[in-house]
Image: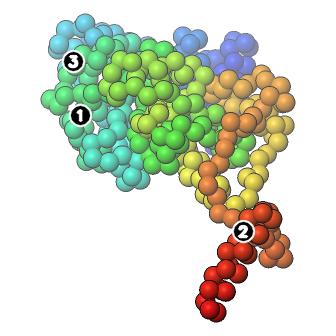
């Protein structure tokens, strides 16, 4: 069985000087791969391709995805086209199209809504086109842009909301992939301006955490990107007021996973509030256990390091209208107003007297 290496494993090997002992076919978590990149350690691709330090056709170094890192936005047009049409980038195009289909099939996007992106090199990004349904994209539809949003390659025009993705990538170096969609339950929270409560389901606490809401700005504007970018240092998923959801990660697959997790959570919370009972929460101690797991995985969370008494704070959470659950025994728990009862009785008596007359 292949060994899975986490951030902790990488740090332990680094301290002992044994990073070179990692097998070529080992499973590396996305966060552990980021740590290897931070340490300047390059590994061979598991597919058997040339090692990361090998030279590409253009003479540059290749990362673990097989992407030539020497290509920049100001590289010759021929180099940009070579990168855009390379087998490694084609594989990433296929991944984007696959995620786009899943977003569409789950009704997370409608019409031509939503957009996806992957950072290829220091200042070159692969992204979805505008005015194309995410359920029916083809690899040849995708676009190449620089970090300012200028299109470098592709026959279709890039998405109008790429500026938000680029703002996230500039603010958060670990964000190599960004997913934006409009899943209805999570978007409902964003429209209502209600931050989802915490301490209810372990999965969202480990992989996402508290989900903040970025103030509304017009989609596609630099202002919207900046509002979201202010939150991505501590959060990997953000609700956008009156708009939708955006999530980032090391891969487009994982960015999509976060979209699924936050949507399922918001749906579960909404169902819970309709049951007419006080939702149960796990204890701050249990959340502390989850945050310890999260820290080992290298997932950011501003609550890491807080005292237990500061966790599970849902003071601002106010569930909406819920169905009324009768008290045990069928007795009504609603209080009566004696004065109102007197008035009702007097009116009833008067009506009955007139009917008798």
- Within 10 angstroms of label 1, few (less than 14), some, or many (20 or more) residues? many
Q: Nearer the viewer, mark 1 or mark 3?
A: 1
Query: Element type at marker 2?
Result: helix
Which residue is at 20% across, 35% downward? 140
Q: Looking at the image, what colour scheme do you see?
A: rainbow
Q: Is residue 227 left or right of residue 78?
A: right
Instruction: Please give the label number shown on residue 343.
Output: 2
Q: Quadrant of the C terminus?
A: bottom right
Q: Quadrant of the N terminus?
A: top right
The residue under label 1 is 130
Mark 2 vs 1, N-terminal side: 1
Q: Nearer the viewer, residue 187 or 77?
A: 187
Q: Position of residue 34 (x, y in %)?
A: 55, 21
Could you tell me if the residues under marks 2 and 3 are in contact, i.e. CB atoms within 8 Å? no
Q: Nearer the viewer, mark 2 or mark 1?
A: 2
Which residue is at 45% across, 48% downward? 184
Query: Element type at marker 3?
Result: strand
Q: Tell me: residue 294, above or below residue 302.
A: below
Q: Tell me the quarter of the picture where residue 28 sits.
A: top right
- Label 2 and label 3: CA atoms lie apart by 77 Å
Mark 2 vs 3, N-terminal side: 3
Query: Element type at marker 1?
Result: loop
Q: Nearer the viewer, residue 266 or 2?
A: 266
Instruction: Please give the label number shown on residue 152.
Output: 3
């Amino acid at each position: 069985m292949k060994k899975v290496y986490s951030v902790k494993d990488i740090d332990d090997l680094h301290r002992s000087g044994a990073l070179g002992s990692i097998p070529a076919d080992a499973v590396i978590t996305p966060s552990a791969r980021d740590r290897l990149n931070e340490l300047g350690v390059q590994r061979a691709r598991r597919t058997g391709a040339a090692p990361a330090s090998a030279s590409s056709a253009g003479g540059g170094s290749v990362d673990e995805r097989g992407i030539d890192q020497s290509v920049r936005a100001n590289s010759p047009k021929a180099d940009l086209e070579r990168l855009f049409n390379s087998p490694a980038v084609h594989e990433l195009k296929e991944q984007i199209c696959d995620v786009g289909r899943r977003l569409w099939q789950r009704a997370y996007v409608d019409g031509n809504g939503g957009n996806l992106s992957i950072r290829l090199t220091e200042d070159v990004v692969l992204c979805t086109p505008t005015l194309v349904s995410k359920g029916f994209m083809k690899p040849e539809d995708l676009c190449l842009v620089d970090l300012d949003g200028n299109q470098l390659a592709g026959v279709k025009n890039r998405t109008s909301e790429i500026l938000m993705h680029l703002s996230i990538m500039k603010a958060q170096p670990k964000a190599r992939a960004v997913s934006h969609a409009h899943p209805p339950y999570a978007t409902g929270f964003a429209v209502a301006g209600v931050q989802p409560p915490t301490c209810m389901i372990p999965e969202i606490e480990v992989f996402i955490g508290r989900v903040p809401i970025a103030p509304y700005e017009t989609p596609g504007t630099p202002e919207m990107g900046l509002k979201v970018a202010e939150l991505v240092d501590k959060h990997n998923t953000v609700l956008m007021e009156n708009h939708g959801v955006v999530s980032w990660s090391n891969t487009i697959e994982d960015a999509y996973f976060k979209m699924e997790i936050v949507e399922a959570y918001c749906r579960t919370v909404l169902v819970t509030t309709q049951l007419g009972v006080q939702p149960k929460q796990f204890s701050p101690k249990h959340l502390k256990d989850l945050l310890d797991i999260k820290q080992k995985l290298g997932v950011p969370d501003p609550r890491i390091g807080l005292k237990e008494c500061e966790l599970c704070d849902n003071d601002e959470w106010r569930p909406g209208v819920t169905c009324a659950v009768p008290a045990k025994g069928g007795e009504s728990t609603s209080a009566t107003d004696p004065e109102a009862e007197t008035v009702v009785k007097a009116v009833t008596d008067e009506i009955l007297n007139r009917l008798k007359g």
